[in-house]
Amino acid sequence: MKSLDKHVQLKLSTLESKKLLRKLAETNRSTSGTTIRDNKKLISFACNDYLGLSQNPDVIRAIKEASNKYGAGAGASRLVTGNNVLYKKLENQLADLKGTERACVFGSGYLANLGIIPSLVGPKDLIVTDQLSHACIFAGADLAESKILTFQHNDINNLEGILKRERSLHQHVMVVTDGVFSMDGDLAPIPELSKLCKKYDAWLMTDDAHGIGVLGNGRGSNFAFESASEIPLQMGTLSKAVGSYGGYLCASKPVIELIKTRARTLIYSTALPPAIISASISALNIIKTNPELTKIPLKNAQFFTSILKLDKAVSPIVPIILGDPERAMNASKILENKGYLVTAIRPPTVPEGTARLRFAFSSEHKIDDIKNLAKIVKKNILCN
Ligand SMILES: Cc1ncc(COP(=O)(O)O)c(C=O)c1O
């Protein structure tokens, strides 16, 4: 065996022995929260399409019309020839939704974090992030070559201790956190974070990938609190509740101007297909004009947590932590055999010893399906 294959084979067998090998399963998503896997129809609680907008007829029509008009791909990066007229409309919608002067759309949420963070901070600066922040926040922070420190999950006192000790040692400080934690479903304490960042002149960035469309009447996690806080950098994705694809940053005019001229993932990556931008525009219109729709995923999650007497859900994401990866995989298989798709999440996506089932609730779910799922979870998983 050649050295490369030998090296890789060893890595694969080590992962296999720890039950950490990941496999792609062919999945054909359909309407009403259903999915076909291995020729079997499943009700999916594993998808971030919280409002079913990826399957919405108006959104699909928008895609078809834009692809008829503009074709399949963008052909170049936004700064070359890829800056389709639809970008302006989408960016205005996003800035309006988040209450900022401007917005900038990226190829994806992951690309957004990789582009934004190193455009704003560098080697003389400090980035402080929640220990459970999404992987792409850490990846973006690594590219900045700043000092990186983590604070204990949602622990304001721990963060303040770090800022007190470190603030004067750095030119600029950026504090970055998920708005809704993708694997835990809890919210960052945004009002306290905003106050603290102001006190220490640190720039707060929230990643609202799982908040837009489903919290605060669809405006996101910052708007789920009694009053919205000042957040100079509001980042997120269009690939979850918005049902489409792409990432964004909402911020002041000068910040967005700098991002559009410096963010490497915007400059050196092909723009989004125009049809995808059109889908996002259509979906954001639906979100803006249907505040009642945006509330349903959370209500469904809360219905589930109330049946199982779990902590009341504060977002559409509900984890059930099982600890061992094998136990999480087995639990997922049990649910699949009963007709429900619920993904097992294992390290390194979550910390060692916290493998879990992650339930994602959508407006498409039916009350009876949630009840039945809760019954099965209670009988087959929580009792073990
Ligand atoms: C918190 C968070 N940020 C960013 C991303 C990346 O977004 P995208 O899927 O658009 O690349 C995700 C998606 O998994 C996420 O959960």
Image (spheres, helix red, strand yellow):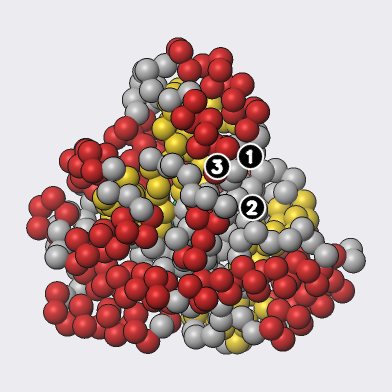
Q: Nearer the viewer, residue 110 or 222?
A: 222
Direction from residue 102 to residue 230 in the image, left or right: right
Q: Which residue is mark 3?
A: 191
The amino acid type, in three-letter code, at marker 3 is: Pro
Q: Earlier in the sequence, mark 3 or mark 1?
A: 1
- Does the residue tagged 2 have its C-beta within 8 Å of any atom of ligand 1? no
**Mark 3–mark 1 distance (CA, rounded to whole Å):** 12 Å
Q: Position of residue 11 (x, y in %)?
A: 57, 45
Q: Nearer the viewer, residue 191 or 151?
A: 191
Q: Which residue is mark 1?
A: 154
Q: Position of residue 357 (x, y in %)?
A: 70, 62
The image quadrant that residue 172 belongs to is top left
Q: Residue at x 63, y 56 (%)?
A: 185
Direction from residue 115 to residue 69 in the image, left or right: left
In this view, 89 is above or below 197: below
User: Residue 337, can we see it?
Assistant: no
Numbered disc 1: secondary structure = loop
